[in-house]
């Protein structure tokens, strides 16, 4: 099974050669600068060499290493002087699981997916705001009542300047389960007129009323079309976001593998007989009130809805 899905790679110790190749390719400062240069647009080798003030031969070698590792892709195109090699980012996000396979098998997990329009409560929503499906806007833009439009379940992009959405996930109703970790992932970014960088926004996540933490998003992302953003969506509007993963286990709470608090899985009060409440939004006490865009599987760079994973063990 491929470790690359869209512009995301999931690496593990079970495929050490792949992990080593990508890690080696990213170990060079020059190759990292090439990745930075290709963030907003594709460039040929000559343009990269000029921008990075490097010899053509050095730049071409660095490009080949990144291409061989599957991090960028190149395409030979005609030019005034013959041909040129156009370089484009192939990966934007790389996750590394360094847990041995035998350890992974000790915990069983379930995965629950929720369309971004499947929220139960939309609270304190303020314009600018709106919803869009794969094919059109849903209701009227900047109209808060549209957040309860009957077609909201088809939403693939939701944006608002302030407020919170609550999603309710059903648990397995079995008494002898012990939940030992929870993971939540979604794609999001700030919300500015059109798009803007920088444009900070404090986006908070809570589970069962317990705040996991706040992520300060640096910008409202645009400048290129999102990987799965539909063609009808204007190039002058928000295009994609950042894929963020929140995890709570016995040792604390983590955001993209970085520990952010001591809140542990036991404190979330997960009851198999009740739903799990997940709240995502801009808290009233946020220092950076920059709004948010929430992406579904039909918008942005990552073709996924909200994904909640629960690790559990069955008591004897």
Image (tube, grey):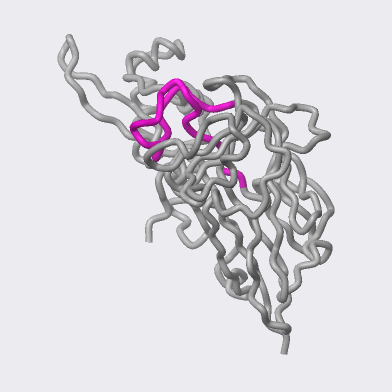
x then y, percent, for residue 209: 80, 55
State which quarter of the image contains the C terminus. bottom right
Residue at x 34% of width, y 23% of height: 60
**Residue 22 seen in the current view:** yes
Would you place residue 178 above or below residue 2 in this image? below
Q: Which of 203/74 is in front?
A: 203
Q: Vertically, is 164 above or below 65?
A: below
Query: Relative to residue 46, is residue 234 depicted above or below?
Result: below
Specify whether residue 223 is painted magenta.
Answer: yes
Quadrant assignment for the N terminus: bottom left
- Queried whether the magenta region covers residue 48, the answer comes back as no
Q: Is residue 53 above or below residue 21?
A: above
Q: Residue furthest bottom?
A: 316
Main SS class of the magenta portion in the image: loop
Give the residues drawn in magenta, as a range: 220-244
Rendering coords of residue 237 (x, y %): 48, 24
Answer with left or right where residue 312 lies relative to residue 20.
Answer: right
Q: Is residue 20 visible?
A: no
Q: Name the residue: 60% across, 59% down.
A: 308
Q: Give the residue displayed 58% in from the left and 69% down from the top.
A: 110
Q: Residue at x 79, y 59 (%)?
A: 251
* The one of 197 and 144 positioned closer to us in this rendering: 144
Picture quadrant where residue 105 is located: bottom right
At which x and y percent is residue 102?
58, 72
The quadrant in which residue 57 appears is: top left
């Amino acid at each position: 099974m491929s470790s690359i899905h869209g512009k995301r790679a999931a690496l593990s110790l079970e495929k050490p050669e792949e992990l080593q190749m990508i890690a080696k390719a990213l170990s060079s400062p020059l190759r990292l600068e090439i990745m930075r240069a290709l963030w907003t647009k594709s460039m040929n080798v000559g343009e990269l060499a000029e921008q990075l003030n490097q010899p053509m031969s050095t730049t071409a070698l660095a490009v080949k290493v990144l291409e061989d590792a599957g991090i960028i892709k190149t395409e030979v195109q005609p030019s005034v002087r013959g041909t040129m090699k156009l370089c484009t980012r192939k990966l934007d996000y790389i996750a590394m699981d360094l847990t041995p396979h035998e350890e992974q098998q000790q915990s069983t997990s379930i995965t629950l997916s929720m369309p971004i329009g499947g929220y139960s409560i939309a609270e304190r929503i303020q314009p600018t705001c709106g919803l869009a499906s794969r094919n059109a806007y849903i209701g009227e833009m900047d109209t808060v009542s549209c957040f309860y439009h009957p077609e909201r379940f088809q939403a693939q992009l939701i944006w608002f300047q302030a407020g919170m959405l609550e999603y309710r996930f059903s648990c397995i109703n079995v008494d002898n389960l012990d939940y030992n970790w929870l993971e939540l992932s979604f794609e999001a970014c700030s919300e500015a007129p059109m798009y803007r960088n920088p444009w900070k926004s404090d986006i908070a996540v809570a589970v069962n009323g317990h705040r996991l933490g706040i992520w300060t998003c640096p910008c409202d992302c645009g400048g290129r079309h999102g990987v799965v953003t539909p063609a009808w969506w204007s190039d002058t509007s928000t295009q994609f976001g950042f894929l963020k993963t929140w995890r709570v286990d016995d040792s604390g709470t983590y955001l993209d593998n970085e520990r952010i608090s001591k809140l542990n899985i036991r404190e979330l009060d997960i009851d198999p007989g009740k739903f799990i409440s997940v709240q995502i939004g801009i808290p009233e006490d946020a220092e950076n009130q920059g709004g948010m865009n929430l992406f579904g599987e039909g918008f942005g760079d990552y073709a996924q809805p909200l994904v909640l994973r629960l690790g559990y063990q069955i008591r004897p």
